[in-house]
Amino acid sequence: MGKLRPGEAEWLAPDRTERPHPLRNLLLLLWTLLNCGLGGSAQGPGEWTPWGSWSSCSSSCGRGLSVRSRRCIRFPGEELCWGKTHEYRLCQLPDCPPGAVLFRELQCALYNGHPVLGPQKTYQWVPFYSAPNQCDLNCLAVGHAFYHTFGRVLDGTPCSRDSQGLCVAGRCLSAGCDGLIGSDAREDHCGRCGGANDSCLFVQRVFRDAGDFAGYWNVTLIPEGATHIRAAHRSRNHLALMVRDGSYVLNGNWAVSPPGTYQAAGTHVVYTRTTGPEETLRAAGPTSQDLLLQVLLQEPNPGIEFEFWLPRERYGPFQEQAQALDWSLRQPQPREVEPQSPETRAAPAAIPPWTPTSSPDPCTPCPDTRGRAHRLLHYCGSDFVFRARVLGRLHQAQETRYEVRVQLVYKNRSPLRALEYVWAPGHCPCPPLALHREYLLAARRLISPDGTQDRLLLPHAGYARPWSPAEDSRIRLAARHCPI
């Protein structure tokens, strides 16, 4: 049996399945045409022609405008087209040479020697920038204390001497990251125009390590491609920045650099220092090479906050480098090992897996945590969702600590290391994790009030499912339904 067309479905009664008579369809079509042609309601908006080509730039140097247009084609009874007839984009040409006549100056000069305020009196005109509307052609009479407004400036005129905006139809507008004037498109933290921060990861921590002597201490590696870099602290210590070849950008060789803007790794580094004392380092990025952030210690370190965004494809190599150099990405978690000096401390990857202790006391059954609602609740409400293999388990007082190897990250609010500790409340955690098994885990980040402990917490009756391809598909589906 063939499929019903939309027009035919209108004629089917609930208890009938035969096709309607063709004559009825013809009558319906004639009624529709007559209704549209004899003053019936409008049938929606017209249609736009394709956009025309972009015009040449409005300026011969510096910043200017390019415009393109389209026309609305509509039949009698149709509404106007929805949208704009003109679209403007920014065009950037080489900088104007010194002494070049500005676009606004040229427009004012067009009225030089022409009678404006009377048939006999003429003036010489220069731009006047203190008038209320920046996009009016406000010109000051040379040698006199008044200005005159000659209507609007031409499209593409800068709004003011130092403004990034351009005048379009009498309004001061800025360009979005897509180059279109008036566009709301903005770059995300990953540097993608109109992106949603989903192509990069956020690295953030507080460096609290303190050495036993004054001098330079490594804080973190800032990898190539990092954006939105920030580091700050409040102490008499000084931040130092080193490039790949070992030379210092600022505060190197035991010399304190003045506050200001420095060029490093293809980006501008803004270094500020107040008498607070507070010291801040910022850079927009992206960096064109690795940078090493250090601190020149002169007094105990109260903590150095740093953060940056990193493309996802660069996060893995960065994590390996940081672990090889023993620069942990989060605060080190307590370990039951003998204290060691910074020179002899082992990297996290070299820590042997924990061996299981003696069998615990019998535990009561855990509550049933199966179902889509439970999965969705914990995925959306957790800070981390990842796939991991359980390497060890240790019972401590009223807590259980699992050592896991992270294999795949589905969601993270801060970076995860290859080896992590996951803490669960109670001597009999629910759900329990078996050694040498792989799980999908949803954990929360728990930081102690004094900042000395930074843990991954697996809540009681939380989400911990044995990994399988089917569960992998379910957790990826849950990610689409979290509220933004």
Image: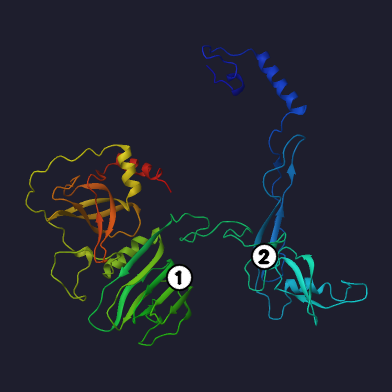
What amino acid type is highlighted by mark number 2? Leu
Count the labels in the image: 2
**Mark 2 closeness class: few <14, some 14–19, many ≥20 residues within 10 Å:** many
Q: Is residue 472 above or below residue 225?
A: above
What amino acid type is highlighted by mark number 1? Ser
Q: Which residue is mark 1?
A: 288
Q: Say which element carries label 2.
A: strand
Q: Say which element carries label 1.
A: loop
Residue at point 72% right, 21% down? 31
Say whether residue 384 is left or right of residue 154.
left
Does the image show residue 430? yes
**Mark 1 closeness class: few <14, some 14–19, many ≥20 residues within 10 Å:** some
Position in image of residue 30 (x %, y %): 72, 20
Q: Is residue 287 above or below residue 212?
A: above
Q: Which residue is mark 2?
A: 166
In the drawing, what numbered circle is on residue 321? none
Say whether residue 40 is left or right of residue 286.
right
Position in image of residue 416 (x %, y %): 30, 59
Q: Is residue 406 above or below residue 132?
A: above
Residue at point 46% right, 67% down? 286
Q: Residue furthest front?
A: 145
The numbered mark, 2 or 1, whose residue comes first in the sequence reads 2
Position in image of residue 339 (x %, y %): 15, 72
Position in image of residue 425 (x %, y %): 19, 51
Q: Estimate the spatial distance between the alpha carbons at disc 2 and disc 1, rounded to whole Å.
A: 31 Å
Of marks 2 and 1, the one in the foreground: 2
| Contact check, label 2 and label 1, Cβ < 8 Å | no
Q: Is residue 354 above or below residue 242?
A: above
Residue 197, quarter of the rendered image: bottom left
Q: Nearer the viewer, residue 49 or 426?
A: 426
Residue 29, quarter of the rendered image: top right
